[in-house]
Image: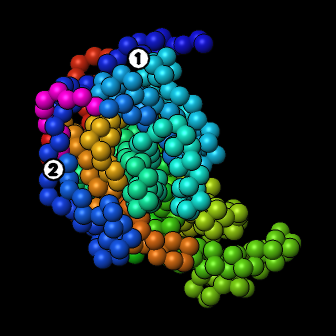
Amino acid sequence: MTKSALQIARAAYQPKLPKALKGAVKVVEGEATQSVADQEEIKKLFPNTYGMPLLKFVEGEQKEFAPVNVGVILSGGQAPGGHNVISGLFDGIKKMNPANRLYGFILGPGGLVDHNYKELTADVIDEYRNTGGFDIIGSGRTKLEKEDQFEKGYEILKELGIKALVIIGGDDSNTNACVLAEYYAAKNYGIQVIGCPKTIDGDLKNDMIETSFGFDTACKTYSEVIGNIERDCNSARKYWHFIKLMGRSASHIALECALQTQPNICLISEEVEAKNMSLDDIVTYIANAVVARAAEGNNFGTVLVPEGLIEFIPAMKKLIAELNDFLAVHADEYAAVEPNKQREYIISKLSADNAAVYASLPEGVARQLTLDRDPHGNVQVSLIETEKLLSEMVGKKLAAWKAEGKFAGKFSAQHHFFGYEGRCAAPSNFDADYCYSLGYTAAVLIANGKTGYMSSVRNLTAPAEEWIAGGVPITMMMNMERRHGEMKPVIQKALVKLDGAPFKAFAAVRDTWAKETAYVYPGPIQYFGPTEVCDQPTKTLQLEHQK
């Protein structure tokens, strides 16, 4: 297989580990925990894994471990560093006992249910150290939630002599890990289940999980390209660039990229919802910035748009909810309507408020809102070209203002969506180190007989040597939420906090950025060179820890 010069050089990189993980490890138990909300319900659902203590690893004395076979699953969307979690897990279990073996289940949780697996030997692992992607075993989105799935999984675990399973995923995947841990504990099957916090969206975090892996690399990858576009924008001086960024449920990516690149405008979904802004409010906000910059002779700019923005606009949220309910019942009837009459048909079926909002939307976006639903019956938000919707509506507003003599500049838009480009990039030094430590931590949790825990590595703004490794009970992060019409236990998503340090730092300077051309050009991720260039954590982490 041909490799690039960077792949060859990166293969030799040895990720840094916290001091406590470098030798023999002792587990220190902290206080008992409880879920973030709905304590009684969560406790009832997880009697065997609720209320367990927080764990911290410190240097200890060497001891012998009986051999153990371990399984690993990559679940959900890709995130840079997944291969290093598996490398750290492999090195960790091999250090505890060279006879330990690691099996990877192919294409996500479905591989466990379908008994599709391969042994991950040193030769295989060495091919994938410090690389991006999940291609070592692939990933998938099968939900582990039914007893027959758990039992099918148990059959293959028993057959391979696997005593512990590591699930690398986001909030939903780790919720599944917790349900599986509880089920196997209740049945006394002797199978441990450990989770690892993954998602580029950055919405799996709390006091014990300071950031999810992949967020650092993805934001640095997007910020490089945003910086390049800002440079182009400032060179040609004739376009407004509308850039949509991944992040359906939270705006952490958009906020972090804004802090790194200083665009003219960055929309934050959580603020839009909190201020009860309408689509027209957002359009007017952008249009005012265009007018102000045009008055200074600057007919150009950059706008960052989070992928999930549409669902956070209260009026749009109501419209989408009614559309979801209506199309769940009348999809066939709608499909039978002639395409040129579908818009009128939908308007005639909606409540007055929602019909008015729907009628105000450009044709293309209105159509996208009625397209095929995802398996959960929801609008596929990433298919809605929010960046085009906003620029089209801004253009219309500016044309109206021009006719009224309120705008004398020019407005021409370009559109971009940065999504998949950031999910499989070669991990930054931070993510390479963090992921390796998370995998190694999972190995220590397994060696110490733990189940229902998530791997936790904290103090991340310090050098890796000073990071604190341990475990956090997954039940601690849970609350009850309505899914498919019934209440389910799920890990609580972390949205952008409007009173948090990262948002406050952004809010303090955004008016200046809107008027001035204050662009910052981060350039590509650096893997070799001075620490201050190569090993910086995200601005979000630095601000949250006041570093």
Dot 1 lies on which element? helix
* Image side of residue 30 versus residue 48, left or right: left
- The disc at residue 10 is 1
Q: Is residue 6 above or below residue 153?
A: above
Work out how far the residue at label 2 is from the one at label 1, CA to CA, in angstroms.
37 Å
Query: Which quadrant of the view contains residue 44?
Result: bottom left
* Kind of residue at badge 1: Arg
Q: The C terminus appears in which quarter of the rendering?
A: top left
The magenta stretch spans which residues?
Answer: 56-65
Q: Is residue 504 above or below residue 314?
A: above
Query: Which quadrant of the view contains residue 346?
Result: bottom right
* Image side of residue 458 versus residue 383, left or right: left
Query: Can you give x and y, in whole percent of width and height, for residue 54 in the image?
Result: 20, 53
Q: Is residue 25 visible?
A: yes
Residue 119 part of the magenta-drawn span:
no
Dot 2 lies on which element? strand
**Magenta stretch mostly in which secondary structure?**
loop
Graded by Cα atoms within 10 Å as few (under 14), some (14 to 19) or many (20 or more), the crowding at tag 2 reads some
Q: How many marks?
A: 2
Query: Can you give x and y, in whole percent of width and height, for residue 66 in the image?
Result: 32, 32
Single out the mark in the foreground, 2 or 1.
2
| Residue highlighted by disc 2 | 29
Residue 59 part of the magenta-drawn span:
yes
Q: Residue at x 54, y 78 (%)?
A: 485
